[in-house]
Amino acid sequence: MVILERAVKFEEVDAAGIVFFARFATYAHEAMEDFFSQLDGGYVRLITERRLGLPAVKLETDFLAPLRYGDVIRIETSVAKLGRRSAVFVYELKRKADGVLASRMRHTVVFSDLEAMQSCDMPPDVRAAFEAHVVE
Amino acid sequence: MVILERAVKFEEVDAAGIVFFARFATYAHEAMEDFFSQLDGGYVRLITERRLGLPAVKLETDFLAPLRYGDVIRIETSVAKLGRRSAVFVYELKRKADGVLASRMRHTVVFSDLEAMQSCDMPPDVRAAFEAHVVE
Amino acid sequence: MVILERAVKFEEVDAAGIVFFARFATYAHEAMEDFFSQLDGGYVRLITERRLGLPAVKLETDFLAPLRYGDVIRIETSVAKLGRRSAVFVYELKRKADGVLASRMRHTVVFSDLEAMQSCDMPPDVRAAFEAHVVE
Amino acid sequence: MVILERAVKFEEVDAAGIVFFARFATYAHEAMEDFFSQLDGGYVRLITERRLGLPAVKLETDFLAPLRYGDVIRIETSVAKLGRRSAVFVYELKRKADGVLASRMRHTVVFSDLEAMQSCDMPPDVRAAFEAHVVE
């Protein structure tokens, strides 16, 4: 499990006064980027130099409790499934102050060559990053 | 079915050059707002004056084809399920130019009193808007 | 003068309940894109096929009245200055309901070759678009 | 001078491949929020509990060099002017890797009671925060 903490930002709420629901996918992406800080050069180098990426094929989000400006979010990231070319991340977003689970997300990605825009096998360092965090 | 067309905006792409995956939920929300233009005063009056809303409890997104700057998106919105206090929207996002299905989303909402932040029954005009677009 | 009307979106407000100040630059960009709908293929073709663009070198924004969810914005775009390689757009953002001026923006752009990332002369159709809307 | 470092995020670029110009105002706001971490409870408590805020009346941005995904931005915040109810922040945004100045921004704010939406005098802790960073 990899843990990322970040505060809700001033502009992330909507006209109902709670975090806009599309922002949860942004949080998921931040958690994934952070997950790959395990790699040399991180997610940035993966995308910009190695030209490898992990486009989403599926994202399932359960919204369990609202988040508000002022909340700090604790995102717990783990790997629920690992294939040769695909993987499923699970993110649990908790309000840090009281531990309430605000959202659970399942994020299925396919490892891809961004030049060819085609799936490909994961290189060993990416596979190792995933394997270190697979849960049953 | 309610149809909304809108162009991908200049800032909606990401560093991989395709529409950022969190934007799809924003598109879904736009389609929902547009869906409620059937109501007197629309979604705006529902939220700001009547203080009623439809917080998401679940959002499932399948990403089937990438979208790019320059694409016009055609969003087809229908209602897959209608309960007393909840409903399931289905959005099909197609590239207008070639009709390719870029994403299918299922969006479960619970009708709520925004002051009490508690679920409540739908008023007749909201129910009628849903009923007009229920599909099997 | 070119006029664009668009509603404030649900997610464009901030935790103070008014439109987040960075959104005004987004509105300016939308107005500029709309301004170039005069061109064959519009702003999209200019950027993606012709690989010409107008990076900002300066943006000055006066915030005169807050905007809120539910407001429709009327953006009046004109050209305050026109050089060989640069131009200054002026945007006046008004609340449509009462005509109140919410913001005035001056946006200085330099016409550029996006491949070389270097300034260049404007092609005739771009110049003609500007000239049609120059004001004293 | 207060210094904030943050990486450009995956979704902050536009279809021209550089950071979208409206994002610079978002960076300015982050720097301002960070500036007020000097206060007890920070900017969050100022806004949500004390109901005091600093709406912008003017924002002037010079764009001097493009920023890209992968860049880390170093934002240097100082106070150029301090009145009884208003202040001018200056932000210098530098690319951390090479120190190149990407943007300089002047941000004029008016201290306000958010309930009355009216300007008011700054409380002593806010004034002290400003005074600690006034530059000639």
Image: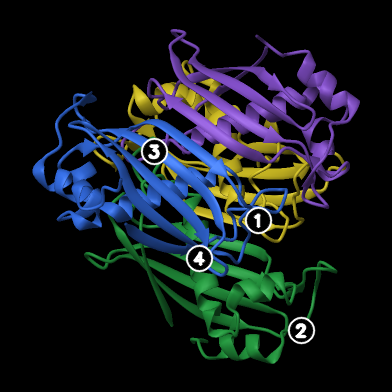
Chain colours: A purple, B blue, C green, D yellow
Above or below A64: residue C56: below
Give the mark toward the camera: 1 or 2. 1
Describe residue A23's horizontal placement relative to residue A16 as left or right: right
- Chain letter of the residue beneath label 3 in the structure image: B
Task: Please check whether the numbered discs 3 and 4 fall on a single chain.
Answer: no
Q: Which residue is mark 2?
A: C121
Residue type indicated by callout 1: Asp
Q: Which residue is mark 4?
A: C30
Disc 3 to disc 1, how far (Cα)? 28 Å
Secondary structure under tag 3 reads strand
Q: Nearer the viewer, residue A102 or D91?
A: A102
Q: Position of residue A26 (x, y in %)?
A: 57, 35
Task: Please check whether the numbered discs 4 and 2 fall on a single chain.
Answer: yes
Q: Mark yes or no: residue B83 visible.
A: yes
Q: Which residue is mark 3?
A: B107
Q: Are there few (<14), some (14-19), or many (20+) residues within 10 Å of tag 1?
A: many
Disc 3 to disc 4, how far (Cα)? 28 Å
Decide: marks 3, 4 in contact (CB < 8 A)? no
Residue type indicated by callout 2: Asp
- Chain letter of the residue beneath label 1 in the structure image: D
Q: Which residue is mark 1?
A: D14
- Chain letter of the residue beneath label 2 in the structure image: C
Residue type indicated by callout 4: Glu
Give the mark toward the camera: 2 or 3. 3
Describe residue A65's horizontal placement relative to residue A130 as left or right: left
Disc 2 to disc 3, how far (Cα)? 49 Å
Q: Nearer the viewer, residue D28 or B13?
A: B13
Secondary structure under tag 4 reads helix
Secondary structure under tag 1 reads loop
Secondary structure under tag 2 reads loop
Image quadrant assignment for residue A51: top right
Give the mark toward the camera: 3 or 1. 3
